[in-house]
């Protein structure tokens, strides 16, 4: 399938370029604050984002055509509304995790302004990057080539897959060379083989909901708001609660972040069904 092949080449190209530029960047910076693999993965992420620009030009697309079509005022309005809705959606999952004793309230950590600010900006950055890439560029091209249904499936598949492409072993910073980046990339892609199926399914369903919102509203602003709120709440929940390995319901959460899993899959499928079935289409602008 054209879209799948293109996205695979897109990912691999960014990864390989990152593999070769990370070593000179690491040597130039002379900073051991981060492991070398962090330089590789962050370089790859940067290239994935930068690659959007020439790709748009090549396929004669624009930022507006991939979903960045809101005025500043309407963006903040849509972002705020969807952020609040997103908090409501994920709060149900977190409440059930605590109620079922899958996660327990931490006795040592407490909510602080610093934590809120850190979680919010992390959510915003992650959402801007991933939504521009998956519900923006990838969704638009897939829809153009194969139609809406395939676009939803493919963009969600690659979105879920990306979360498992990460190094599973540390590389020795004192024995680096020009091909060390390639070693990191191969190690990162091998991480896909170790992923938990329920974690992948949960992220796929998340991607599906976001893709549906992208299609129904025609705007990435709503997707960014939803995504940012989920990252925000997950980071706060992980700081303020602990996973209970003794819980009888532990199977409802996966291994990825201790939050998503079968429980979130079930709940999000209900949300998707309600969204597709009951949301009044007449209140939603035409898809872009």
Image: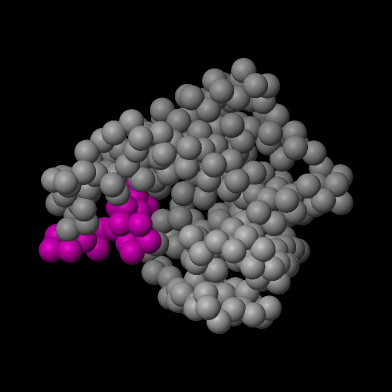
Q: Position of residue 38 (x, y in %)?
A: 53, 63
Which stretch did the figure color magenta? 245-267
Please name the residue shown 59% across and 31% down the image. Answer: 221
Name the main secondary structure of what is drawn in magenta: loop
- Color theme of the render: one colour
Tell me if I can see residue 149 in this picture.
no
Tell me, yes or no, if residue 180 can be seen here.
yes
Q: Is residue 192 magenta?
A: no
Was residue 252 drawn as part of the magenta stretch in this picture?
yes
Q: Pinpoint residue 205: horizontal percent, then vertical percent.
A: 46, 52
Identify the residue shown where x is 44% and y is 62%. Answer: 200
Tell whether 51 sits left or right of 26. right
Q: Nearer the viewer, residue 116 or 52?
A: 116
Q: The C terminus appears in which quarter of the rendering? A: top right
Residue 222 location (% of width, % of height)? 55, 32
Q: Is residue 257 above or below residue 86?
A: below
Q: How many marks?
A: 0
Compared to 129, does 21 lie above or below?
A: below
The structure residue drawn at horizontal position 68% and vertical position 21%, both measured from the top left corner, is 71
- Choose between 275 and 134: the one closer to the eye: 134
Decide if residue 269 is on the left or right side of residue 96. right
């Amino acid at each position: 399938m054209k879209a799948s092949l293109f996205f695979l080449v897109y990912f691999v190209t960014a990864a390989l370029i990152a593999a070769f530029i990370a070593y000179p960047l690491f040597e130039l910076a002379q900073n051991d604050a981060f492991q070398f693999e962090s330089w590789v993965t962050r370089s790859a992420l940067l290239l994935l984002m930068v690659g959007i620009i020439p790709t748009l030009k090549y396929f004669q697309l624009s930022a507006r055509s991939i979903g960045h079509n809101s005025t500043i005022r309407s963006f903040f309005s849509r972002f705020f509304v969807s952020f609040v809705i997103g908090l409501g959606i994920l709060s149900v999952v977190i409440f059930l995790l605590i109620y079922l004793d899958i996660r327990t309230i931490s006795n040592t950590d407490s909510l602080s302004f610093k934590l809120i600010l850190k979680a919010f900006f992390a959510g915003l950055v992650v959402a801007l990057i991933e939504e521009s890439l998956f519900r923006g560029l990838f969704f638009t091209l897939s829809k153009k080539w194969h139609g809406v249904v395939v676009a939803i499936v493919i963009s969600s598949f690659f979105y879920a897959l990306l979360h498992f492409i990460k190094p599973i072993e540390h590389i020795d910073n004192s024995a680096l060379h020009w091909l060390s980046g390639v070693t990191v990339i191969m190690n990162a892609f091998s991480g896909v083989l170790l992923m938990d199926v329920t974690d992948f399914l949960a992220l796929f369903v998340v991607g599906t909901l976001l893709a549906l919102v992208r299609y129904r509203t025609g705007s990435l602003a709503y997707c960014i708001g939803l995504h940012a709120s989920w990252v925000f709440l997950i980071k706060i929940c992980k700081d303020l609660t602990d996973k209970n390995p003794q819980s009888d319901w532990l199977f409802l959460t996966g291994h990825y972040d201790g939050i998503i899993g079968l429980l979130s899959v079930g709940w999000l499928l209900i949300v998707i069904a309600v969204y597709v079935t009951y949301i009044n289409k007449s209140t939603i602008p035409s898809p872009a």
